[in-house]
Image (spheres, helix red, strand yellow):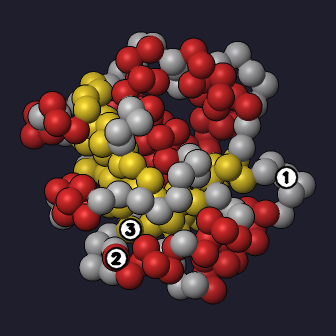
């Protein structure tokens, strides 16, 4: 499985998605997380702690040795990055916050990804009783954009995971199990398609 995680907008959970999907794919086979974002957040996070997947920056990555590869791109990825990685990808995942500003960027991205297999993932969704996630999914339906049925809820456990250099499932937090379950549901949906 080759997954490219990209977004036109920063701050939508792209790196968090890449790290957690790499961890879930590592349970299925040898996995490499490629950090193609000049900010280097995924590389810094993964090398700060003990992860069960390999991590490399884009210029030193050797993806052919791995069964699964996840690429974390920069916000507003350059055409070269898209060309280099997207044509080899089985799936492009586009994280988006449930805000109107984030959702408004998606139709432009759809035009760029028209011939590629992509799915939108709603991230940073306020937990219930908020209806923001539900409204975002309805908006994606209205825009006729392919998307995951589940969402990634916004929990402070994710920030704790970044600080510790671990996955959210390894954080001592009452919401950590729910946060991990959100990504596990995305992993299950990827392999169910």
Could you tell me residue 134's position as x and y percent? 75, 67
Q: Which residue is mark 1?
A: 128
Q: Secondary structure at mark 2?
A: helix
Mark 2 or mark 1, whichever is nearer to me: 2
- Identified at 29% across, 73% down, the residue is 116
Could you tell me residue 144's position as x and y percent? 53, 85
Query: What is the distance, in whole Å, between disc 1 and disc 3 at their CAs?
Result: 27 Å
Q: Earlier in the sequence, mark 1 or mark 3?
A: 3
Confirm whether residue 185 shows in the render: no
Query: What is the distance, in whole Å, between disc 2 and disc 3 at their CAs?
Result: 11 Å
Number of residues whose C-alpha sits closer than 10 Å to that of mark 3, classed few (under 14), some (14–19) or many (20 or more)? many
Point out which mark residue 118 bears: 3
Relative to 52, is 10 above or below? below
Residue 97: quadrant of the picture: bottom right
In this view, the residue in front, 155 or 39, is: 39
Point out which mark residue 81 bears: none
Could you tell me residue 107's position as x and y percent? 50, 80
Relative to 99, is 6 above or below? above
- Identified at 34% across, 74% down, the residue is 113
Answer left or right for 44 relative to 177: left
Relative to 109, is 90 above or below? above
Number of residues whose C-alpha sits closer than 10 Å to that of mark 2, classed few (under 14), some (14–19) or many (20 or more)? few
Q: Are marks 2 and 3 in contact (CB under 8 Å)?
A: no
- Identified at 38% across, 82% down, the residue is 111
Q: Secondary structure at mark 1?
A: loop
Q: Which residue is mark 2?
A: 112
């Amino acid at each position: 499985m080759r997954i490219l995680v990209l977004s036109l907008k920063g701050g939508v959970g792209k790196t968090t998605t890449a790290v957690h999907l790499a961890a879930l794919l590592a349970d299925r086979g040898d996995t490499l997380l490629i950090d193609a974002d000049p900010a280097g957040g995924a590389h810094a996070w993964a090398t700060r702690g003990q992860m069960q997947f390999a991590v490399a920056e884009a210029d030193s990555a050797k993806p052919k040795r791995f069964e699964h590869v996840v690429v974390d791109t920069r916000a507003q990825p350059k055409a070269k990055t898209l060309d280099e990685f997207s044509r080899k990808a089985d799936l492009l995942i586009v994280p988006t916050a449930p805000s109107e500003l984030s959702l408004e960027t998606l139709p432009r991205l759809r035009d760029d990804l028209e011939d590629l297999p992509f799915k939108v993932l709603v991230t940073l969704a306020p937990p219930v009783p908020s209806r923001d996630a539900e409204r975002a999914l309805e908006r994606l339906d209205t825009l006729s954009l392919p998307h995951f049925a589940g969402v990634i809820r916004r929990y402070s456990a994710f920030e704790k995971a970044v600080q510790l250099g671990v996955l959210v499932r390894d954080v001592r937090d009452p919401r950590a199990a729910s946060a991990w379950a959100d990504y596990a549901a995305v992993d299950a949906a990827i392999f169910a398609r």
